[in-house]
Amino acid sequence: MAATVGVVVFPGSNCEHDAVEAIEALGGTARIVWHGSADLGGLDAVILPGGFAHGDYLRPGAIARFSPVMEAVGEFARSGGPVVGICNGFQVLTEARLLPGALQKNAGLRFLCREATVRVERTDTALTSGTNVGDQLVLSINHFDGNYLADPETRRRLAEEGMVALRYVGNPNGSMDDIAGICNPEGNVVGLMPHPERACDPLTGGTDGAVLIGSLLASAGVRTSY
Amino acid sequence: MDRSHAPEPAPGSVAGVEETAGVAEPLHRALGLTDEENEAITALLGREGNELETAMFAVMWSEHCSYKSSRVHLRRLPSEGPRVLVGPGENAGVIDAGDGLALAIRIESHNHPSAIEPYQGAATGVGGILRDIFTMGARPIALMDPLRFGPLEDPRSRWIFEGVVRGISGYGNSVGVPTVGGELVFDPTYTGNPLVNVLCLGILPIDRLVLSAASGVGNLAVLLGSRTGRDGIGGASVLASAGFEEGSAAKRPSVQVGDPFEEKRLIEACLELLQSGLVVGIQDLGAAGLTGATSETAGKGNVGMDVDIRSVHLREEGMEPFEIMTSESQERMLAIVTPADLDQVMEVCSRWEVRASVIGKVTGTSSLRVLDGWDGPVLADVPALALGEDRPLYHRPLAAPADLDARRELNALGALRAPGPGESEDDLKSMLMDTGPVWSQYDHQLFLNTVVGPGSDAVVLRLKGPGVNSVDSDPLGRAGSDRGLALSTDGNGRWCSVDPRVGTAWLVAESALNVACGGGEPVALVNCLNFGNPEHPEVMWQLSESIDGMAEACTALSIPVIGGNVSLYNESAGVDIDPTPVVAVLGLVPRLERRPPAVGLVEDQSIILLGARDESQGPGALDGSAWAARRGHRAGALVPVDYEAHAALLGLVAALAVDGLLGGLHDISDGGIALALAEMAVASGVGAAIGGVRDHAELWSEAPSRVLACTADPLGVLDRARAAGVPGLVLGSAGGTRIGVEGLLDLELDEAVGAWRSRLSG
Amino acid sequence: MIFEAMVEIRTRPGISDPEGATIESALPRLGFGEVSGVRVGKAIRLSVDAPDEAGARRRLASLCDALLANPVMEDVEITLMAD
């Protein structure tokens, strides 16, 4: 049976339809999970999609992390379940402390919707298992607050424990160490600013994102077989 | 005071004296109603209106809401067509797109609010147009923004430009509707009065189409969304209609503030209510606030309504009834529901965290009554229909400019000398502009439908809603839809200042040709008519001529006009803007198997000119052109559109665009062949060498009905052109590091790219 | 007792503040060359019901920690204005 990926919707999320479309196009099954739900109900993987949860008021992700669903997502992550935060979802994961660091305003002080090339740095993660280190992927970025930063200690830890999953080739937003995506040491929780779901169709955004969404489906499938 | 609605001074009196004499001005005049309009109200009510009633009439009868100056002309536009489901007069026009899907489209201006507070003016413009679309039951899937400002070198124009772009970006991105394109023009005519137009397109299953009529005595009117505050009080009559004089900062308090997060929740809640069949009718709260929404829903349903102002959630204490009834607070909707469905409606709203309260009841009378408490005193009692149906209709005097004939004789080709060495290269560099720094601030990809995004002749989207059927409760998703839609917005104040009638016809032709470049067959048009002060007879003449030109072109090309917006009083310091109608043509793309050809060149392919050359070689070739305007020449006579030839070109281009025969494609318009070729070159980083262009007139002519195509199969394309009855000529080929037109132009590609890039960023 | 409070949230020293830097770089051109050290933050006004000032401060500090500020990049300063 195809892996089932839950796509969490907060008030203000807007990329949930796109995540669902990409998952289904690649043979997975998707289910929308409302942020008020405290139970994930037997999912194989979770995506926190892009958008502006709670309007990004106060700080992106700051209010969303208190939604009932986030406790369940936290438990799911701690039990080894694959969790991917895309864009606003990445911001929610850092606010929820499921990933370290924070995302501040782009160095150019402008919203950026454009192509960005990323290089794969680590392949034993829920999102990159189908890639090779050094692979370059062309994806879209679409954010105002994508400038990753962390304190010096965390920065050291990211390097030592290999927690950087993707780096920009040509830094678009001032991100520390060109970081485009990071993961937890175990690799099952991944956050990234680029949108892989926007690059799964040659007509609309290229196909470089398919390997990432495909990797997530594979990770979810492995989990089902436990 | 609002000069635009000031009554004509009495004979012999000196304007302004009345106010300084210390005599209190009658209420109706202060509210912007003329003495005649006030008499009409008295006749309708059978008595004098009280303060609240007069205020309600004043907002509904403002130019902005009533179209009192333009309606008499708008009637001449063709609005019927086989695909038209809803024409002008509703919140949005709707066409049948086939397969059980419909498309709703509307364009609107937010010029005056944006001049005062650029960020919020533009942001609330986006919010307002979205509500017009989801009011119809459609999910908004695309926004476009035709923008016009004064020169970038003018600091205030730059400030307005940057604020407007940030406002569109801030609101549009956050509300979660992609901004897929638009226009960007800088011209001195817009220095004191920018044009900020915004278009929204929505998609809906045909059976969800709803109109805004209330029905069913005893049904309830539920106000959804934001609390009502004092923002935008008098906005409809003050902000939207008044020209700009010194001291506009004093008008700032009535600027509305947008909340995209509230709007996002409102979209989701309303679409869920509509999809679940829980509402009888629904209407957004626009320029005339609660007065407009309640009177329109009641009037259209031929029923009456009681409104209890105490039930309206307020943001501020101590608001007067007239403030509550005319407030333009954003992000509000009025839903008509049956008492039996009320609990379910409240439940949906509560899940989306949308505030909802019953503020009105449908009655069997024809009166709109405003009550202070359900059993309290009646504060206003007016015939619901009177506010809308009985609005004034003016046949304002119109007159062609006195020097019209003389100006028509001044053709640019005769009046201006041919360019000297280096001049053409400088002209070209001054016209190139990379709009990427603007549109990269807009999310133009959301919903995975954007096949061709900003920066092309037409935007091309897949014909589907967001998501997929199997999961989404919204039954719009059609993943992998093999049909598409193409959309283009086009305006040109320069053409229309030379000749508003032919200039507008050129616009319709250009917009349709852009849509064809995206593979689309034009099916509908909406317009946003930005003109000056209608009390100036020349402006009324421009408006009337422009509408005639549009009617002629739309009739000839069989494109129905399904909606429009008129923005008058675009003037500053007594000077009217150039007449700037903006049209948007919507087309359907029957097959979408590959991306249509880009505005670009492919190394070693041939460059072909498609379309007749007679007009671009004739004596009027340069009239209306950017080349002539750069030399201060804005006169002459635009060549008429040959509709038969244009229709043949439209069919040919649309077919070529979807057949995969072309490597690049661009219509010839602003800046003529020179700019079209250069834009193709800089966008792709490939040079070009062409010949066969007769002279500088043909190089810079903006005569309609021509495109440049780039192809690896020139004979095949020429065969197709011949079969379609369209002249075609191979001009040269793509490649190299220069942009060259034999004997006329020679510019290094890198230099062109540099000029293109630095225009906005430098 | 109701305490009116002002919570000021600033980017922590050493963390780049592009907005502040942009404003500062514009100052010499405007004739304010003597102004420096521009940092952009947020100010949040609120009121809190607490038995005493120390209690109010404690509650506000935990609110800042939980929601209002992100300690990875922000510092807070709480100012109490007792009625």
Image (cartoon, coloured by chain):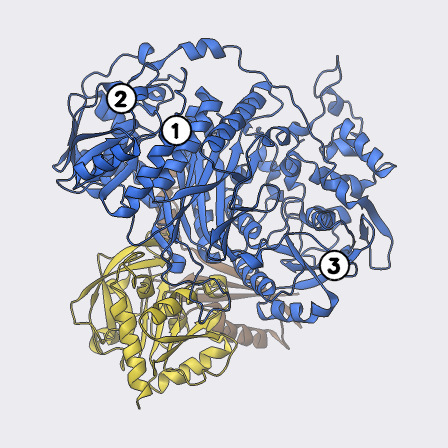
Q: Secondary structure at mark 1?
A: helix
What color is chain C drawn in? brown
Place residue B716 in its image quadrant. Answer: top left
Amino acid bearing label 1:
Glu
A157 vs A141: above or below: below
- x and y percent of residue A87 in the render? 36, 65
Q: CA distance from mark 1 to mark 2?
A: 22 Å
Return the mark for residue B698.
2
Q: Residue at x 44, y 55 (%)?
A: B173
Task: Check disc 2 and give the amino acid type.
Answer: Glu
The residue singled out by tag 3 in the image is B359
What residue is shown with label 1?
B644
Q: CA distance from mark 3 to mark 2?
A: 64 Å
Instruction: Tell me the number on the disc at residue B30.
Output: none
Residue at coordinates 16% horizontally, 72% vertically from top-left?
A132
**Residue B105 visible in rendering:** yes
In the rendered image, residue B130, in percent from the top left (x then y), is placed at: 53, 51
The residue lying furthest to the front in this view is B723
Tell me the quadrant of the picture where the N terminus of chain B can be found.
Answer: top right
Chain coloured blue in this rendering: B
Q: Dot 2 lies on which element?
A: helix
Left or right: C18, with B260 as reference point: left
Give how far across and how far down residue B383 sits, in percent: 80, 44
Q: Disc 3 sits on a residue from what chain?
A: B
